Amino acid sequence: MKENHKNVYELKAVADGRAVALESVGDRIFAEKVLGDGIAVIPDNGRIVSPVSGTVVQISGQKHLYCIRTAEGTNILVHIGLGTVKLDGKGFASLVDTGDTVEAGTPLAQVDLAVLKENGYDTCIPVIVSGQEVLEEKSCRLGEIKAGASVMMEYTLK
C-alpha cells in the first residue's frame, strides 16, 4: 500500500481458509463489484467471524448476509455462500443480533457447510466494502488465512 496521509483500514479473515480475489467469485454481482469492492474467502469450516470492529446494522432473514458499520461509517457486507438466500436459513445459525457491537474476530454465524454443498451451493464468502467507488486503493493478501487473526485486505477510503 502506498504511503499517503489517509487512514488505512483492515479487513481481518472471516473464516479459516483461503483468501481469493473477488474477481474470481462465481457470481457476477460480486465478481463485477456491483455492490462494492473487496475480497472473498473459501472457508475450511463454518465458523464465521466479523472482519472489522463496528455495529451489526443488518442481518438477512435467511442468516446468510451480515452488514457491519465501522466507526468511520463504512458498511462491510459478509455474504456467506453464493445463492444461499434460497436455503431460507437452512444450515445457518446467527450468533449476533442487529444492534450488537462486535470486534474483529467476534463470531457472527455458524454455518453447516455440508448443507450448502449438498444443496449445490458454493461456500465462497464475499466480503465487500459497500458502495460504488468508495475505495481509493486496496491491497489484498491472498492465500491461507486464520479467522479473526489474518489481515486479508487493507484499504483507504476516498
Image (cartoon, rainbow, N blue to C red):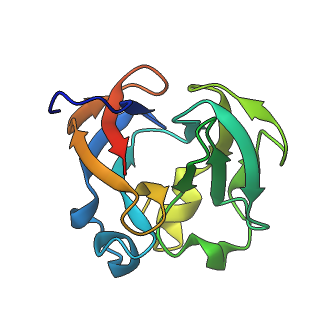
Q: Quadrant of residue 104?
A: top right
Q: Nearer the viewer, residue 36 or 142?
A: 36
Residue 6 x %, y %? 34, 33
Residue at (73% x, 73% y) in the render: 88
Residue at (34% x, 70% y) in the render: 33
Residue 136 x %, y %? 29, 51
Residue 35 x %, y %? 46, 71
Q: Nearer the viewer, residue 125 or 121?
A: 125
Q: Nearer the viewer, residue 124 or 149?
A: 149
Q: Residue furthest left?
A: 2
Q: Quadrant of residue 17?
A: top left
Q: Quadrant of residue 29?
A: bottom left
Residue at (17% x, 33% y) in the render: 1
Q: Is residue 85 left or right of residue 34?
A: right
Q: Is residue 143 above or below residue 151?
A: below
Q: Is residue 82 above or below residue 97?
A: below
Q: Residue furthest front?
A: 5
Q: Is residue 93 above or below residue 105?
A: below
Residue 11 x %, y %? 42, 36
Taking the image as drawn, is residue 12 in sight?
no
Q: Is residue 82 above or below residue 155?
A: below
Q: Is residue 105 left or right of residue 108?
A: left
Taking the image as drawn, is residue 103 in sight?
yes
Q: Residue furthest top?
A: 149
Q: Is residue 28 left or right of residue 3?
A: right
Residue at (49% x, 24% y) in the render: 148
